[in-house]
Amino acid sequence: MIGQVIREFLPLPDLLTYLEAILRVYNRHGRRDNIHKARIKILVKALGIDRFREQVDAEWDAARATGPVLPGTEVARIRAFFQPPAYATLENIDAAAGREPEFQAWYRYNTRAHKVHGYRAVFVSLKAHGRNPGDMTSQQMEAVANLAERVSFGQVRATHNQNLLLADVRQDVLYEVWRELRALDLAMPNIGTLTDMIACPGLDFCSLANAGTLNVAQAIQKQFDDLDYLYDLGDIEIKMSGCMNACGHHHVGHIGILGVDKHGEEWYQITLGGSVNGFTALGDVIGPSVAQADVAPTIERIVEVYRAQREDGERFIETYRRIGLKPFKERVYAAHSEAA
């Protein structure tokens, strides 16, 4: 479900009492008869956001005078424990100038601008084609840890896109960092492309899953193994879950893939148009689920519609919002009819 605004502005000292009011309303009216519906989102949907807000405000007005206050001094005290690292005083350089095309591609797709001059943030891609997305070996992890000790203040961050991040890398060592990551098979220059997909473990590792995901991910990688083609497509987010628990957040992927069980066989429901970046939306189901072997070809047909319909500079999600579901659905299921 998409979150709804309950209050536009709240002074910092009132944060704790307002959160308590929300929890009190949920505690009073939340579902205890059904473990699957014991969620605050279920209560908000049942009451409606306006009625839920009214009850929270009433609870807050009744208890805020005697409730806990969050003073700015306490926030400042806690904030003081999170000091920035000891950045050197540097100037920005063009680290990609004169380097080979492979490094230039990695620099463009796997690094990002930093707010401090002379540094860049570096993504460690865990999406090498032919590998399970998000996986790495213990040897690779040890090597990345050692690299971080030398070039990123000893910190490695995990991203929600199932990659790693070296957040504070000096621009003058980027080439050496790339060479080390490439030797570890961790420098696939595909961050932000279609094969930089999110996938839950699926049936291979999860007892809740209805269908596999890792083999489907590898089939998609094989279908879209040309980096120049991926770069031409631009920003496309694929998110895949092996069941309705949605650990892969398929419902907010530009292209979402949900594994379902049909009489003991693995099938996959495809959604389009989901997003969490700037414009939040849940994906639309394109039609009946497809067999496992048809997932990658189905994604390719969806991409073909985008390539044919996009306007200059338009991303996949922007084309989808402009033309809607129908052209994609017609292309996908016309192809299935022809194959049948």
Image (cartoon, rainbow, N blue to C red):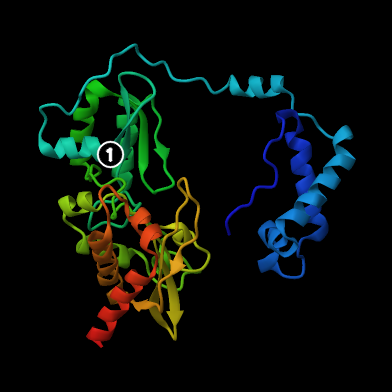
Q: Residue at x 29, y 66 (%)?
A: 302
In depth, the one of 308 and 141 nearer the eye is 308
Name the image quarter holding residue 14.
Answer: top right
Where does residue 337 sit, x and y in percent of width and height?
28, 85
Q: Is residue 68 left or right of residue 309?
A: right
Where does residue 228 sit, x and y in percent of width and height?
16, 50
Mark 1 Cα-neighbour bin, 10 Å: few <14, some 14–19, many ≥20: many
**64 is higher (above) or lower (below) than 236:** above
Q: Residue furthest bottom?
A: 340
Name the image quarter holding residue 198.
Answer: bottom left
**279 is higher (above) or lower (below) than 45:** above
- Residue 16 visible to an observer of this rendering: yes
Q: Is residue 326 left or right of residue 129?
A: right
Name the image quarter holding residue 133.
Answer: bottom left
Q: Residue at x 17, y 29 (%)?
A: 96
**140 is higher (above) or lower (below) than 156:** below
Which quadrant: the C terminus? bottom left
Where does residue 67 sit, x and y in percent of width and height?
84, 35
- Residue type at mark 1 is Asn
Q: Residue at x 79, y 38 (%)?
A: 17
Where does residue 200 sit, x and y in percent of width and height?
42, 60
- Residue 254 visible to an observer of this rendering: no
Q: Is residue 19 left or right of residue 270?
A: right
Q: What residue sits right under mark 1 in the picture?
A: 110
Count of numbered circles on the image:
1
Which quadrant: the N terminus? bottom right
Q: Is residue 25 left or right of residue 138?
A: right
Tag 1's secondary structure?
helix
In depth, the one of 150 and 30 nearer the eye is 30
**307 is higher (above) or lower (below) than 296:** above
